[in-house]
């Protein structure tokens, strides 16, 4: 067996080349807490010196590697023979997890939720896209049905020619207004639903999720067509609220007063089905979405009768301190998405929470997946929820300490570090792209490779594992677990300080030589 050769040939040829060039082609044998133990030399099976892991499973190891409490839950599942494949039965683990998720989010929002479990983050995003489409179609169908009913009634009662006494259609015969409304709704129903997401958004890489994702650094031919979509480039609240006004279709409604007199009322319908946002954008370089923008998105969604979806897959689960990263904004979404740390680093699990009053019951009958709802993942996830609550203060304190330390690095080397961003244990350090005099070095230090070159230096010189964020590769992610201690925080600060100093002093060869 040859791991590296098989990896290069049979799994990720392009990444294998990149990892080899940057000496990131390391195999890890074990993980405990914030540390991974690499293989000393290729194929030896011998442990090397542990590495402090700040990649943290791309944000999924909030409780570190193999947290003992979570391992114990997993071990018990296997020892007791808890069924993994018991589809088509009442699955208690999934039920308990769903209830607990609803309670935890509801503690902030005051609402109750119906939970759709899945396996990956993108899975939850796809489920949200689909549920929003169902909700949207049913809303339009109900509007059409109600309008047709009123039209039949006015015709039956001989009121077809009666003019509307008030509202936008005042003076026009009510049957004509109603027939026009039916036609407009029918046209709208034939159009595909429209989805909205923000500049720099990252929501995953499957068809619909990939469309919502901004991903400017992904080659065009690697994207597949997804649902109809609008990107909000301008985050200014006024721009957000009115961004899709041109999509709104005026469809006056008509009601008959007690005296049988028809009155028209202003109503707009819209093809917008859902607006997505990550309250703190992770993969685009750890960028906070301002509370005012989140509030504007709430207004936008309400203006279009659309669902507001908060993707808390990376920033939620207590990674920023509170269970919801959006808590401080005071803005309430209709759907919430979780994954990553929900699985406690041991299970692949995700959840879509839909507010109970919006949930379409048939959705849960028809939207199924082989590996969703398994008791193993659900039990591990329920235990992870417990840890998320227990570690809240610890995460807040460690996050503040780490951010302060990194901010000191940024203040010392402003030529190298553009900014330190984030909250709690979701932090990013944005480096400035160096401009070496040598043309050859400029080729090497492009925006796609800078983060990886830094990662190589951090790994081989400092025994610290970092990687750039996926769609902003000059930002290095710093996402340790809740267990990180003051000593390791100081180590992280010192390592970033050294690397920033190397860049600020133009010692580019140093970054290439490890
Ligand atoms: N949403 C967000 C905010 C994410 O950060 C990610 C993963 N980086 C996803 C969705 C997709 O999750 P997955 O990789 O499990 O499909």
Image (tube, rainbow, N blue to C red):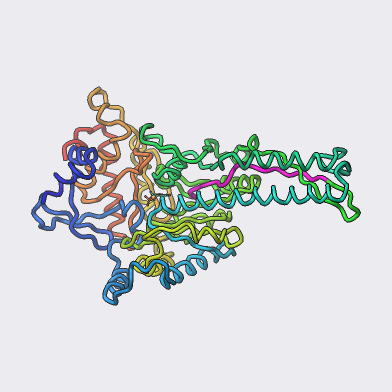
In front of the other: 389 or 104: 104
Quarter of the image with the C terminus in it:
top left
- Image coordinates for residue 82, horizontal then vertical, percent: 32, 73
Q: Which quarter of the picture shows residue 418? A: top left
- Image coordinates for residue 251, horizontal then vertical, percent: 73, 41
- In the rendered structure, the answer to whether residue 110 lies left or right of residue 156 reads left
- Image coordinates for residue 366, horizontal then vertical, percent: 48, 58
Residue placed at 14% from the left, 44% from the top?
5
Does the rendering let one see residue 318? Answer: no
Residue placed at 13% from the left, 55% from the top?
48
- Image coordinates for residue 168, horizontal then vertical, percent: 81, 40
Residue placed at 44% from the left, 72% from the top?
90
Q: For residue 514: magenta?
A: no
Q: For residue 267: magenta?
A: yes
Specify the farthest residue to the right. Answer: 259
Does the rendering let one see residue 298? Answer: yes
Specify the farthest residue to the bottom. Answer: 80
| Span highlighted in magenta in the image | 264-279
């Amino acid at each position: 067996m040859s791991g590296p050769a098989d990896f290069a040939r049979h799994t990720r040829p392009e990444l294998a080349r990149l990892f080899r060039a940057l000496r990131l082609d390391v195999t890890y044998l074990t993980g405990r807490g914030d540390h991974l133990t690499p293989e000393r030399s290729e194929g030896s099976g011998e442990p090397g010196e542990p590495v402090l892991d700040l990649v943290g499973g791309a944000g999924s190891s909030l409780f570190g590697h193999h947290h003992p409490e979570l391992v114990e839950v997993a071990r018990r599942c296997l020892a007791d023979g808890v069924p993994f494949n018991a589809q088509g039965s009442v699955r208690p683990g999934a039920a308990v997890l769903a209830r607990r998720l609803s309670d935890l989010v509801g503690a902030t929002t005051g609402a109750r939720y119906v939970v759709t479990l899945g396996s990956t983050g993108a899975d939850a995003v796809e489920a949200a896209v689909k549920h929003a489409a169902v909700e949207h179609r049913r809303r339009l169908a109900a509007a059409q049905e109600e309008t047709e009913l009123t039209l039949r009634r006015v015709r039956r009662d001989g009121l077809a020619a009666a003019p509307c006494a008030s509202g936008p259609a005042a003076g026009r015969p009510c049957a004509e207004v109603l027939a026009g409304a039916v036609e407009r709704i029918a046209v709208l129903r034939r159009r595909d639903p429209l989805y909205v997401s923000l500049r720099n958004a990252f929501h995953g890489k499957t068809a619909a999720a990939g469309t919502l994702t901004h991903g400017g650094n992904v080659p065009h031919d690697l994207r597949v067509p997804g649902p109809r979509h609008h990107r909000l480039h301008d985050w200014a609240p006024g721009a957000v609220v009115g961004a899709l006004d041109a999509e709104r279709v005026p469809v006056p409604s008509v009601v008959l007063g007690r005296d049988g007199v028809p009155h028209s009322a202003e109503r707009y319908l819209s093809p917008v089905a859902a607006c997505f946002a990550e309250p703190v954008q992770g993969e685009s370089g750890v960028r906070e979405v301002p509370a005012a923008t989140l509030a504007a998105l709430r207004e936008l969604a309400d203006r279009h009768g659309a669902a507001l979806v908060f993707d808390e897959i990376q920033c939620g689960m207590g990674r920023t301190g509170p269970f919801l990263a959006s808590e401080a904004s005071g803005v309430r979404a209709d759907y919430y998405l979780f994954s990553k740390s929900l699985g406690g680093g041991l299970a692949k699990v995700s959840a879509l929470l839909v507010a109970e009053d919006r949930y379409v019951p048939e959705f849960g009958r028809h939207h199924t997946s082989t590996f969703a709802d398994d008791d193993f993942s659900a039990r591990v996830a329920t235990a992870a929820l417990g840890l998320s609550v227990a570690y809240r203060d610890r995460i807040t304190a460690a996050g503040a300490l780490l951010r302060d330390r990194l901010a000191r690095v940024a203040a010392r080397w402003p030529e190298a570090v553009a900014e330190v961003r984030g909250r709690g244990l979701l932090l990013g350090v944005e480096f400035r792209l160096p401009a070496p005099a040598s043309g050859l070095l400029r080729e090497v230090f492009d925006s796609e490779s800078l983060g990886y070159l830094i990662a190589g230096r951090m790994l081989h010189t400092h025994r610290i594992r970092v990687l750039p964020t996926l769609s902003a590769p000059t930002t290095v992610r710093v996402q340790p677990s809740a267990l990180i201690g003051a000593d390791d925080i100081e180590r992280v600060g010192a390592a970033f300080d050294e690397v920033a100093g190397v860049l600020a002093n133009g010692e580019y060869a140093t970054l290439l030589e490890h």
